[in-house]
């Protein structure tokens, strides 16, 4: 595959990425035409901090069970948290329920296409708003996730890789988007896939990369990061997040309120247990009930 000649040819970068994607992109069910905007919204929210195949599997189960925002909005929050299962960061389940309620009440049960209206929904950030607008409706907006950001910073800025900055990163992506909305939708997916499959964090496969001739980082000899790097993932073992997960697992499995003493075996520090429980209550993931704690 031969890439574009210079990084000053943004149209050529998109064209090369799109051609590569047509030949090498993975054929995900949720990227095929016909997936509803509601389905795409579910998958995008679930995939944010969860491996994509797992997220998509759960999203498809949810779509069967709650085929519209109104159907999800009508379900008790406790059921939604249970159905979230072990996807992690269950605040996203509560936020999805709130977003579904807002879509049902304010948008006639139709997921909006306007990025601003999407961003105004509870728990929907710039990434998800643009992903839904572009992938579901073909709106010409830049979609920037971690993979896209890495490709853009390397190829266009010649660095590996700066801390996220939403506006700057969206403008970078916008600078290479083709004029047509349909081509834009493909470019958004193609660059994301390029980052996932070739331009990986540790061992980018530049020889196979369709934009290698335009890549500023490659041309500069792969200099180390110049700006603030992203902080690494915090340690999970022994973390509050792990303790939250264990408490939520007990609550999901219980049919009656769980007595406070039942959590004692999870951590030797009662003050820490109380703090984590208070955090779950503040996030509306758990609440006190007669006899102990329960899902809301
Ligand atoms: S040439 Fe290498 S570093 Fe540059 S975008 Fe392609 S895979 Fe990433």
Image (cartoon, grey):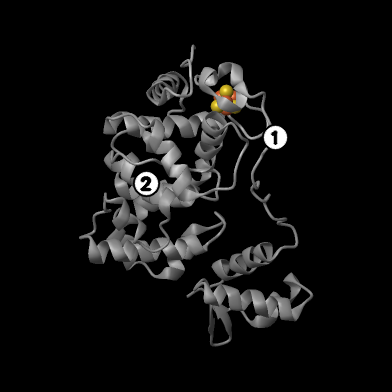
Question: Mark 1 packing: few (<14 Cα in 10 Å), some, or many (20+)?
Answer: few
Label 2 residue near ligand 1, CB within 8 Å: no
- Expressed as whole percent of the image width and height from the top left, the position of residue 20 reads 45, 20
**Relative vertical location of residue 200 with respect to residue 295 in this rendering, above or below:** above
- Expressed as whole percent of the image width and height from the top left, the position of residue 218 reads 61, 23
- Expressed as whole percent of the image width and height from the top left, the position of residue 40 reads 36, 45
Q: Which residue is mark 2?
A: 130
Q: Nearer the viewer, residue 85 or 88?
A: 88
**Relative vertical location of residue 239 with respect to residue 192 in this rendering, above or below:** below
- Can you tell which mark lies on residue 108? none
Residue 66 visible, this orientation? no
Q: Which residue is mark 1?
A: 224
- Expressed as whole percent of the image width and height from the top left, the position of residue 251 reads 57, 71
Q: Is residue 89 left or right of residue 122?
A: right
Q: Quadrant of residue 9?
A: top left
Label 2 residue SS = helix
CA gap, disc 2 and disc 1: 30 Å
Q: Is residue 288 left or right of residue 184?
A: right
């Amino acid at each position: 595959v031969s890439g574009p000649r210079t990084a000053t040819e943004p149209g050529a970068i998109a064209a090369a990425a799109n051609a590569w994607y047509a030949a090498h992109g993975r054929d995900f069910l949720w990227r095929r035409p016909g997936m509803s905007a509601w389905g795409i919204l579910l998958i995008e929210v679930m995939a944010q901090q969860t491996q994509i195949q797992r997220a998509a599997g759960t999203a498809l189960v949810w779509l069967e069970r709650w085929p519209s925002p109104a159907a999800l909005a009508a379900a008790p929050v406790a059921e939604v948290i249970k159905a979230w299962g072990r996807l992690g960061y269950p605040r996203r389940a509560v936020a999805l329920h709130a977003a579904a309620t807002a879509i049902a009440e304010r948008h006639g049960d139709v997921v909006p296409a306007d990025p601003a209206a999407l961003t105004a929904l509870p728990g929907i950030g710039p990434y998800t708003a643009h992903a839904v607008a572009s992938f579901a409706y073909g709106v010409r907006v830049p979609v920037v996730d971690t993979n896209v950001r890495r490709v853009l910073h390397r190829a266009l800025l010649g660095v590996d890789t700066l801390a996220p900055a939403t506006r700057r990163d969206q403008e970078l992506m916008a600078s290479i988007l083709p004029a047509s909305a349909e081509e834009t939708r493909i470019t958004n997916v193609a660059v994301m896939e390029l980052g996932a499959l070739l331009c990986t964090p540790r061992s980018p496969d530049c020889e196979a990369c369709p934009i290698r001739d335009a890549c500023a980082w490659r041309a500069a000899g792969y200099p180390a990061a110049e700006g603030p790097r992203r902080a690494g993932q915090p340690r999970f073992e022994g973390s509050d997040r792990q303790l939250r997960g264990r408490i939520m697992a007990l609550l999901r499995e219980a049919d009656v309120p769980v007595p406070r003493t039942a959590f004692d075996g999870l951590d030797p520090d009662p003050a820490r247990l109380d703090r984590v429980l208070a955090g779950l209550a503040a996030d509306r993931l758990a609440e006190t009930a007669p006899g102990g704690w329960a899902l809301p």
